[in-house]
Image (spheres, helix red, strand yellow):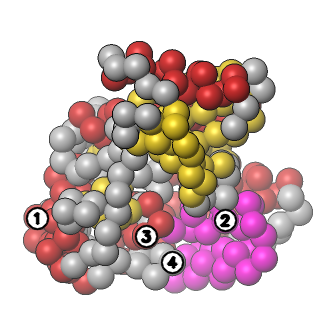
């Protein structure tokens, strides 16, 4: 860590906490494939989680901090407390509360399901968000819309398909898919729920006392089923989570078909970010949705 970043972190934490903070040591940790992550430990024993990247990442860090603040205000499920997003010289950084994670049990997963259901009861008068943010490293468009099918077609699927086209990925039935969105969501009138937006097993965990935590959000107001749909990708969550969620907030008929449509957004994003087998998977999902 260079001296300018060290001073910036110390000053930001001191201002936020009201106590002088000086870094005694740092520890590199895994934190995803986009940013560098570390734990900083102060001389007084305080610990904070820090993400760093080039200066261009400041907008990403600012958007993440804002989403965490909104999720925290809902007072339903725990998120890491954002301390400060800033930039110094050619670097950007995000300081978060450092949490210690432990293994889960059935009760913890049930609590997560119940708490996510409670989060989804927080609604807005529109679909979207106050600003654009990011889904992974991809810009996520959040222009407000009153109609859910319009929002999902125009600001979720269409931008990903445009990125794919620029990369040379051709999905023969892409236009048919976009034309089918309204029919696929026919008679489904969800309320604009407060979402995590990128909820999979890598962005959820449990504190040492079993308290559920979600992090790395890509939040917006949308159909709550989108959060649940993505939890089933990459291994999924245990049955106890889904049972507790649906007991607290039952799902509407047709959610299985809608989940395939909603997860296409994430698979397209993975295809655009990583290529490989995600390209064929996205093509298969489009074919299945169009020809169902």
From the image, give the main secondary structure of the stretch colored magenta: helix
Residue drawn at point x = 14 percent, y = 74 percent:
107
Tell which circle, 4 or 2, labels the residue nearer the N-terminal end.
Answer: 4
Q: Distance between the residues labelled 4 and 1?
A: 24 Å
Tell which circle, 3 or 2, labels the residue nearer the N-terminal end.
Answer: 3
SS under mark 1: helix
SS under mark 4: loop
Q: How far apart are marks 3 and 2 (CA)?
A: 16 Å
> Residue 241 or 287: which is nearer the viewer?
241
Q: How far apart are marks 4 and 2 (CA)?
A: 12 Å
Is 194 contained in the magenta span?
A: no
Question: Where is 16 relative to 73, above or below?
Answer: above
Q: Mark 3 against mark 2, which lies toward the viewer?
A: 3
Tell which circle, 3 or 1, labels the residue nearer the N-terminal end.
Answer: 3
User: What is the crowding at mark 4: few (fewer than 14 residues within 10 Å), some, or many (at least 20)?
Assistant: few
The circle drawn on residue 248 is 1
Question: Where is 126 relative to 263, above or below?
Answer: above
Residue drawn at point x = 86 percent, y = 53 percent:
166
Q: Mark 3 points at which residue?
A: 201
């Amino acid at each position: 860590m260079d001296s300018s970043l060290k001073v910036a972190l110390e000053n930001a934490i001191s201002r936020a906490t009201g106590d002088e903070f000086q870094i005694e040591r740092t520890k590199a940790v895994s934190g995803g494939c986009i940013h560098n992550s570390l734990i900083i430990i102060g001389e007084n024993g305080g610990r904070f989680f820090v993400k760093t990247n080039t200066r261009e990442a400041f907008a990403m860090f600012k958007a993440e901090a804002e989403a965490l603040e909104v999720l925290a205000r809902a007072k339903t499920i725990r998120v890491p407390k954002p301390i400060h997003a800033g930039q110094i010289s050619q670097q950007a950084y995000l300081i978060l509360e450092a949490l210690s994670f432990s293994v889960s049990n059935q009760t913890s997963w049930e609590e997560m399901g119940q708490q996510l259901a409670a989060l989804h009861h927080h609604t807005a008068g529109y679909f979207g968000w106050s600003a654009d943010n990011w889904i992974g490293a991809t810009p996520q468009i959040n222009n407000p819309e009153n109609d859910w099918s319009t929002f999902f077609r125009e600001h979720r699927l269409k931008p990903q398909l445009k990125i794919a086209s620029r990369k040379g990925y051709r999905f023969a039935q892409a236009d048919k898919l976009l034309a089918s969105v309204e029919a696929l969501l026919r008679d489904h009138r969800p309320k604009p729920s407060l979402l995590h937006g990128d909820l999979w097993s890598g962005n959820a965990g449990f504190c040492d006392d079993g308290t559920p935590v979600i992090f790395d959000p890509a939040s917006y107001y949308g159909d709550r089923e989108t959060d649940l749909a993505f939890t089933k990708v990459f291994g999924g969550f245990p049955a106890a989570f889904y049972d507790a969620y649906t007991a607290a907030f039952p799902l509407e008929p047709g959610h299985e078909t809608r989940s395939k449509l909603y997860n296409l957004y994430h698979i397209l994003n993975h295809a655009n970010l990583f290529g490989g087998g995600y390209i064929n998977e996205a093509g298969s999902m489009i074919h299945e949705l169009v020809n169902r």
